[in-house]
Amino acid sequence: MPEEVRLIAVSKTKPVEAITAAYETGQRVFGENRPQEMAAKYRELPKDIEWHMIGQLQEKNVKYIIAFVRLIHSVDSLKLLQKIDREAQKCDRVVDCLLEFHIAREETKSGLTLAEAEEILESEEWKALQHVRITGVMGIATYTDDREQIRREFARLHEIFDVLKSKYFARADYFRELSMGMSEDYRIAVEEGSTMVRVGSSIFGAREYKKS
């Protein structure tokens, strides 16, 4: 992995013991997709861990992670930004967020279009927020064996990043994150300019599902 690319260990569904083992090898950045699970792990694990929220975040669940989360990857609406802002204000924090874009062919994946993101960034409601900071973009490619399709989708996300950077964040040094790439496709993502990859199975093994 290139030094300039950050590795986010996707620890969702993994027990504290597995995270501790990764921590002891030097890993400090972990990604979760369930706020309550992240909060429980935060309470048990060392406080120098950097926690990233990588899954869909409902407004009602922002309160569970707002006091400690380092980066929220999956912001896809103005309403969610406003909720994060209100909760962050209570903690006297400015919370970093990424705008999530829909770049895959799969309709089940969520995210903004470029037009929707521009509508947010040009709104007075966004400009009034003081406790959130957008530091880049995130996207998930189609789950497919077609490597060229994946490459096109990552290239499209990089184009979106460049548009937003030039139009809205030209003077913002903090707008620099391009979060794309997972265990199956991170190599392509890095070639297309990713600054953060979200890797789970390559670190922890196959996903463990809790029995109901």
Image (cartoon, rainbow, N blue to C red):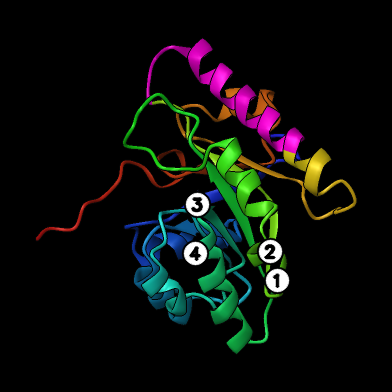
Residue kind at label 3, given as amino acid type: Asp
Which residue sits at x=38%, y=56%? 12
From the image, tell me which residue sits under label 3. 76
From the image, tell me which residue sits under label 2. 124
Going by the image, does 16 lie left or right of 42? Answer: left
Residue kind at label 2, given as amino acid type: Glu
From the top left corner, tell me how far across and down residue 8 is, in percent: 56, 50
For marks 3 and 1 on the same chain, the one whose residue lies earlier in the sequence: 3
Q: Which mark is residue 95?
A: none
Relative depth, front residue between 7 and 177: 177
Q: Is residue 179 above or below residue 130?
A: above
Tell me how far mark 4 sits from mark 3, CA to CA. 9 Å
Q: Which mark is residue 79?
A: 4
Which image quadrant is residue 47 in?
bottom right
Q: Assess disc 3: are there few (<14), some (14-19) or many (≥20) residues with their C-alpha within 10 Å of its C-alpha.
A: many
Mark nearest the camera among 4 and 2 is 2
Residue kind at label 1, given as amino acid type: Ala
